[in-house]
Image (cartoon, rainbow, N blue to C red):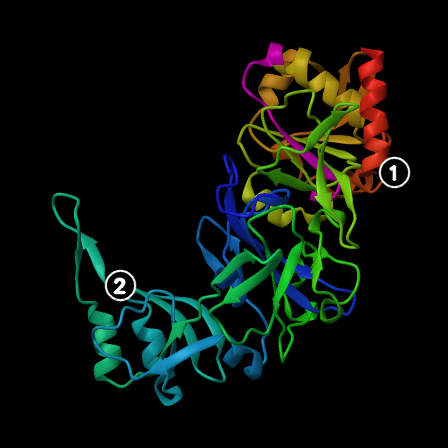
Amino acid sequence: MIIDNEYPATHSMSTSWYCVDDDGNVAIVGFNENGPVPWCTPEESIESLSYGYCEDEDTDEYTSFALTDEQIFDLLGKSHTPTYDDGAFENIVEIDKTKEGRFLELTRNPDCRIELCLSKSLGLYQIDIDTMTQDEDGNWIDIECATWRKMVDEGVVKKIYSPKEYFTNDVYEDNKLRFEKEFDTSPYYIFCQPYWPEFLTTKVSEPAHPVKISQLPAELQRRVIKVRGLFKEMNSFQIAEFHPCTMYSSENGYVVDGCEYELLPMSDGHKAYVMTDLFADIHVPVDNIFTLTPTVLLIGVEDEMPYKYKVTSDFVIKSSVYIKFPGNMVEFITSILKQVLERINPRVILGVANIQKTFETSFIIKNHILHIDGKQYPIFFKEEQVKFRSEIERLASMQYQGKCFPYIISEEEMEQLVKNEDEDE
């Protein structure tokens, strides 16, 4: 077992995501460089997920959660009286509620913005003020924010809270894994994936006032990963058991029947191979897997599915896989699309980018039906999907009709499958 931080992290990342247990308690899972990550998880930190959730990357606007006063104070760091020198970048301020009108007026100035309203009743806001600008040569220089000075001079802001940092450090010593943390409270269960994938995602903090799934916006509730069991009763779990994951930094995998499997520890202590790629042998330029039984095939031109599409089409997305159209239609048809269609046999195909003209000149498409290799597939392009939303959802809800592959394979079963494939060759 590798026990130092020299693990081969050639495709590493750090991020976080939400989970919910059978009792509706919400956890935030922090991921550190290596191991399984739910497909299409955006790069976030525990801190950035604590107060709310960004539903629009273009505007960077956050939707706040319906947190109780107790939960909010569990999130706040130490407070002090504001000064001119304070940098209020993503800091939390408590305003004088008798001067709320003046505060809202000042935050309409171009050098100060409200990022999030934590609690109107408590007068708690997350604001961002401009304390730097670029000079004529493009160099960043410090400046004084005129709006912040007015807030301080006029007593609009009573307190400023430092953002709490959810720093954790995993340590392996004496044949044991332990976590060090530099925070005291959180209203969420906090789990962290150790640097080494040989270990399970581990609980590092338990809340006194747990956030419930009902406190999150309805559109986000549908996207939170469900974990079987109760967080208060578990010390660790394997996220790949509950949601399709991609794998970062592993050398313990096999490709069987065209699917990639990685050896991972399971929640109950044994090891097994978990599917991490449905198209390992097809060499799809980019594939985002939201389910292993997809009824919807999404085709786009970006490395990741457009963010707004992911947010506004939850029901369809949960039933889909996304592949990237590389631009070369001949290569796409002969070596990628036909094989993907043969494998998953989708109920409907959706173009999530401006690819309609390209497809219409390369295929026979009549009345929203794509004809290819003697088969027919309903297809709707970007401009048509609002009009035909109900039909798309009907098709997406139908039973999966593609090839079925095992999601989890025991070590003994994998050994036999690999042996059989070697004999066939």
Residue 248 position, x and y percent, is 58, 39
Please tell me which residue lies in front, 62 or 45. 45
Residue 297 position, x and y percent, is 71, 31
Q: Secondary structure at mark 1?
A: loop
Please tell me which residue lies in front, 373 or 184. 184
Using the image, determine if residue 241 lies above or below residue 263: below
Residue extending farthest to the left is 136
The residue that mark 1 highlights is: 399
Mark 1 closeness class: few <14, some 14–19, many ≥20 residues within 10 Å: few
Residue 111 is labelled as 2
Residue extending farthest to the bottom is 98
User: In the shown orientation, is residue 158 left or right of residue 29?
Assistant: left
Mark 2 or mark 1, which has the lower sequence index?
2
Q: Is residue 252 visible?
A: yes
Mark 2 closeness class: few <14, some 14–19, many ≥20 residues within 10 Å: some
Q: Residue at x 36, y 87 (%)?
A: 96
Q: Secondary structure at mark 2?
A: loop
Residue 265 position, x and y percent, is 72, 47
Q: Residue at x 79, y 28 (%)?
A: 344
Residue 252 position, x and y percent, is 67, 34
The amino acid on which the numbered mark 2 sits, given as a three-letter code, is Asp
The range drawn in magenta is 317-331
